Image (cartoon, grey):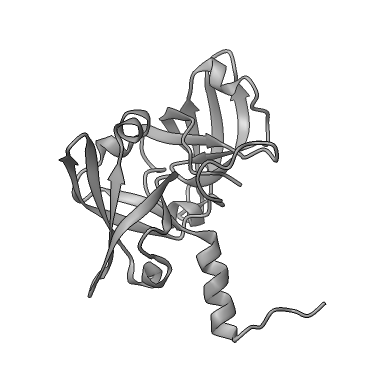
């Protein structure tokens, strides 16, 4: 589990095919500072741009680790198939503060940035989510964009999806990769986990279980 609070901006340095067919994935070599990897071990989970991945090799001294990304994950995410900066978050410990909302690291869909504009000291980010995610998005609800937990300030339903408007404070722009986005950029989206359960209960007409 994760919180959506980005703890480091790393970089995908290299990609190595895990096979020669379309059903094979990629091995990503990710660079990070050595101190960031001090408490990371083989098999640990790290969210990369919001997608939960498992550390398969580790070079603490060299500030690098690798993860294996399946073809399925590559097909359902964006930004994991090319070199470049990525948002990183280590898995949540039971004793950690939950500073935002519970994030699973499972990408629900890929959205498209509609705008990123300065407003006062902050920035306004617009993202068009796929129609299938529209019912999970609400005013003042939570959404994860490329691994960053954010609050929705406005929801606009459109024929081609649901556009959410989000305010980015300067700290978020400076300490994540969201400041590099532009209209047309594709981003990984994860909806609020609680919304998933509510939708499931309503669809089944569920009532609370008795003791």
| Spot occupied by residue 148 in the image (x, y as percentages of width and height) | 42, 43
Q: Which residue is more in the foreground, 53 or 122?
A: 122
Left or right of 29? Residue 197 is: right
| Spot occupied by residue 69 in the image (x, y as percentages of width and height) | 52, 45
Q: Residue at x 46, y 35 (%)?
A: 6
Left or right of 103? Residue 127 is: left
Q: Is residue 19 visible?
A: no
Which quadrant is the C terminus positioned in?
Answer: bottom right
Res. 39 image quadrant? top right
Q: Residue at x 56, y 52 (%)?
A: 104
Left or right of 139? Residue 158 is: left
Q: Residue at x 62, y 19 (%)?
A: 38
Count of numbered marks: 0
| Spot occupied by residue 11 in the image (x, y as percentages of width and height) | 41, 28
Q: Which residue is more in the foreground, 207 or 158?
A: 207
In the image, farthest residue toward the right: 211
| Spot occupied by residue 71 in the image (x, y as percentages of width and height) | 49, 53
Q: Is residue 89 visible?
A: yes
Q: Residue at x 21, y 34 (%)?
A: 121
């Amino acid at each position: 589990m994760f919180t959506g609070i980005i703890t480091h901006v790393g970089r995908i340095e290299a990609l190595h095919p895990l096979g020669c067919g379309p059903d094979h994935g990629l091995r990503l070599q990710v660079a990070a500072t050595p101190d960031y990897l001090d408490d990371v071990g083989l098999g640990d989970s790290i969210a990369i741009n919001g997608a939960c991945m498992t550390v398969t090799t580790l070079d603490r001294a060299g500030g690098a680790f690798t993860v294996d990304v399946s073809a399925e994950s590559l097909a359902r995410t964006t930004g994991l198939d090319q070199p470049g900066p990525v948002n990183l978050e280590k898995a949540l410990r039971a004793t950690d503060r939950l500073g935002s909302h519970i994030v699973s690291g499972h990408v629900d869909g890929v959205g498209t940035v509609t705008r990123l504009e300065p407003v006062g000291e902050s920035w306004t980010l617009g993202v068009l989510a796929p129609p299938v995610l529209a019912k999970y998005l609400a005013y003042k609800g939570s959404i994860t964009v490329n691994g960053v937990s954010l609050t929705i300030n406005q929801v606009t339903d459109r024929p081609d999806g649901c556009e959410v408007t989000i305010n980015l404070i300067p700290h978020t722009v400076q300490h994540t990769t969201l400041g590099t986005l532009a209209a047309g950029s594709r981003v990984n989206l994860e909806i609020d986990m609680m919304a998933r359960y509510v939708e499931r209960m309503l669809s089944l007409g569920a009532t609370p279980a008795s003791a």
